[in-house]
């Protein structure tokens, strides 16, 4: 039986209007002002060299535990518990092991916060840069302070892109999704890579925006990204599974797909 939250309970998640949400608003104020074409280009140069640290996958997951995600209105659990709950909910539904592994590592890119990047450059919803911002992105009013919003190269519907160019040709706001995708792209099946790369792109996978940029490959993989989303959101549970008991299973799974050591 599925361990996910039931439909009525789901309405309480991602509720950005609930009290005490000032921290999340401040997060998006910074994110939407600073994530520009130039900022993303600089981050790609800096982080896609993967020369910051060498760690085993398990050590990297352990390292993540010191982080509390400021963009998330729902969770104050340690990151590894969020990953474990996501993966366990996927496993309970009988999905293939690479899908379970995807649940277990999908936020591993948040190590960027521990490498010194501010949270607004690592977590939160993502969106394309280099073209107009969808009004369905969370807190769209904060884009008024983004210099790209008044740049005629970047503020039209297509911006620097061509219609149907495909998301692979689209630069997304910088964050843990793209970073982890680039790190793992040789190791996992394509549906897993789509889930990793676009799980925070709510304007696309939930709101149906940016269809003018997507291609047939994106359309074919959208259902996978959507299938993943409830596990990410609704498996958040104050009653955590036992990490110690499950560690051997997940260590084997990491070893099956990933290299013994990751250059982060
Ligand atoms: Fe994430
Ligand atoms: Fe997540």
Image: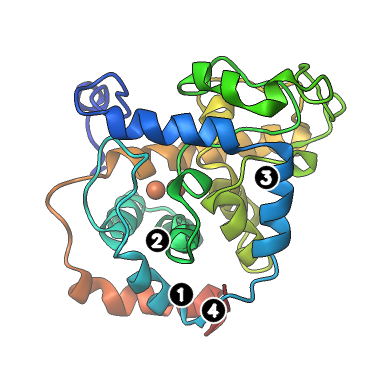
Give whichever of 156, 168 is nearer the camera.
Answer: 156
Numbered disc in front, either 4 or 3: 3
Mark 2 near ligand 2 (CB under 8 Å)?
A: no
Numbered disc in front, either 3 or 1: 3
Is mark 1 in CB contact (under 8 Å) with mark 2?
Answer: yes
How far is mark 3 from mark 1, CA to CA? 32 Å
Residue 263 shows in this picture: yes
Q: Residues within 10 Å of mark 2 (few under 14, many from 20)?
A: many
- Name the mark on residue 53: 4
- Name the mark on residue 39: 3
- Toward the left, the furthest residue is 239
How far is mark 3 from mark 2, CA to CA? 29 Å
Residue sitting at x 26%, y 42%: 2
Disc on the earlier residue, 3 or 1: 3
SS at circle 1: helix
Numbered disc in front, either 2 or 4: 4
How far is mark 1 from mark 4, CA to CA? 18 Å
Q: Quadrant of the N terminus?
A: top left
Disc on the earlier residue, 1 or 4: 4
* 104 versus 137 height, above or below: below
Is mark 4 in CB contact (under 8 Å) with mark 3?
Answer: no
Residue sitting at x 48%, y 66%: 115
Q: In which quarter of the image is the C terminus?
A: bottom right
How far is mark 2 from mark 4, CA to CA? 21 Å
Q: Name the residue under label 1.
A: 254
- Toward the right, the furthest residue is 162
Residue 231: x %, y % from top left: 36, 43
How far is mark 1 from mark 2, CA to CA? 9 Å
């Amino acid at each position: 039986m599925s361990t996910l939250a039931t439909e009525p309970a789901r309405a309480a998640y991602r509720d950005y209007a609930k009290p005490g949400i000032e921290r999340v608003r401040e997060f998006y104020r910074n994110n939407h002002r600073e994530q520009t074409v130039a900022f993303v280009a600089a981050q790609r140069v800096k982080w896609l060299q993967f020369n910051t640290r060498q760690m085993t996958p398990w050590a990297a997951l352990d390292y993540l535990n010191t982080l509390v995600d400021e963009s998330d209105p729902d969770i104050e659990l340690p990151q590894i518990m969020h990953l474990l709950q996501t993966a366990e909910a996927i496993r309970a539904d009988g999905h293939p092991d690479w899908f379970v592994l995807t649940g277990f590592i999908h936020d591993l890119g948040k190590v960027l916060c521990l490498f010194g990047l501010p949270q607004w450059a690592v977590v939160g919803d993502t969106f394309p840069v280099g073209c107009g911002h969808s009004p369905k992105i969370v807190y769209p009013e904060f884009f008024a302070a983004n210099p790209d919003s008044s740049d005629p190269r970047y503020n039209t519907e297509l911006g620097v892109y061509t219609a149907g160019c495909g998301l692979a040709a689209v630069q997304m706001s910088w964050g843990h999704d793209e970073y982890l995708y680039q790190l793992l792209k040789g190791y996992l099946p394509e549906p897993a890579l789509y889930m990793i790369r676009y799980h925070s792109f709510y304007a696309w996978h939930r709101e149906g925006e940016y269809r003018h940029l997507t291609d047939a490959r994106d359309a074919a993989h959208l259902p996978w990204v959507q299938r993943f989303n409830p596990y990410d959101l609704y498996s958040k549970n104050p009653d955590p599974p036992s990490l110690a008991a499950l560690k051997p299973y997940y260590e084997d799974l990491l070893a099956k797909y990933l290299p013994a050591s990751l250059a982060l």
